[in-house]
Amino acid sequence: MNKEEIGVNQIEESNASSASTPVIPAGFIEVTNKTDESIYAPETFHVRDLGSEDLLGMALSDDEMLPIRTIDIFNSLIYEEGIDVGTFTEAEVTCMLRDIFMHFYSNIIKDHAYKLQKSDYEYLAKTLGGEESDAYKKKIRDYKTGRWSPKIDIDISKIKRLKLPKDFKPYIKLERKSTGFSCKYGFPRYGDIKVVKEYLDIAYQREDENHQSIVSILKYRQDQLRKRDDNEDIPYESIPDLTKKQSEEWERYTYDRNITLLKAIRANNLVEYRGKDVSGLSLAEKLDIAEDPEFDLAVYKAISKKIEETPIGLEKTIKVISPVTNKEVDYPFNFRVYDMLQAIQTTETDDLEVSYS
């Protein structure tokens, strides 16, 4: 093969490689998840920034629909097909939003509400005449009522992602020595609430419809009380309330529904029961299995503890400068999806220059 033929082949190979590599449009950034930092999220994918219509969609969603609406909006940010944020852990979703915030907005979350630490209380007591002094008591009272609200800036670019243990597996197995009972759970996913809600909507369809009149009364009452708090002239006696019978019925219904909700959340990630694979069963079928008395409080506490202990997501303790002592402190802070969304909504981008032209 001569040099000319080699050159042609190299060009053809290069063109073929370029054709097989998708060109990511401008406006998308790469999100990377190392294998020792992530459970469910893909190693690499691309996302765009949240738009004003996305934020409006979340703002207009009621409390019940917000988690589901949020998943749909997050999925719309991803360039690649077939990636569902609902299958991520919440920690992985938070890390995705952290990347969006750092690229499109800033490395700094400004004016975050600061919670006083033990060293702050000690400093205030020392500088204000002791814990029994009027000055100290007033300062603490102002803090608790929100009249004094210390703030901090958080540089999220300095916060590291936690590493999973070397022997990590994406399931938690529990065995009871005394009886031989065993079960295995997958890690909770951000979209679990969507599965659970769909189940509850079907299971409680008739009950929900029967209690719509009470829901309407409670919503109207809440709205009127809020207007009174905003100094609107609304006589208190004109605001409707539930009768004793309605209150008792509402209490029974909400208690029953919330207990079912709790059971459904626990059962949803059950993947193995007494050595049998149950990962493909419906939530209703898993709930039937969970009626086994062996699924007691000790089981759920042990599973929850193991999940909470698993190092995933962003560091849970960060270095900040206390606005009270002006010294660096170890500050416990568990970043959640809500924290990053709030930061995105309230932060101006530092990537744009605006001027008259």
Image: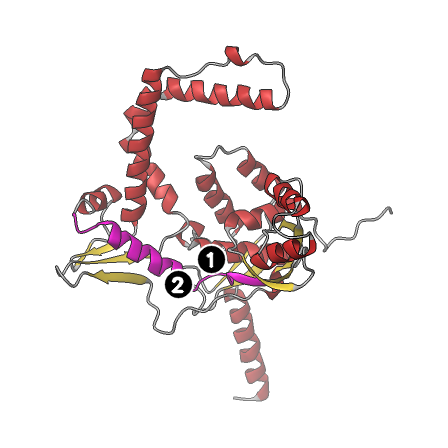
Residue at figure coordinates x 46%, y 45% from the top left: 71
Tag 1: residue type? Glu
Span colored in magenta:
293-318
Badge 2: few (under 14), some or many (20 or more) residues near its Cα, within 10 Å? some
Residue at figure coordinates x 31%, y 42% from the top left: 262
Element carrying mark 2: loop
Tag 2: residue type? Thr
Camera sees residue 348: yes
Q: Which mark is residue 154?
A: none
Q: Is residue 241 above or below residue 25?
A: above
Q: Is residue 37 above or below residue 7?
A: above
Disc 1 target residue? 92
Q: Is residue 110 above or below residue 180?
A: above
Q: Position of residue 238 (x, y in %)?
A: 51, 10
Residue at figure coordinates x 65%, y 54% from the top left: 124
Element carrying mark 1: helix
Front-most of 213 and 8?
Answer: 213
Front-most of 355 and 141?
Answer: 141
Badge 1: few (under 14), some or many (20 or more) residues near its Cα, within 10 Å? many
Disc 2 target residue? 310
Q: Position of residue 46 (x, y in %)?
A: 54, 58
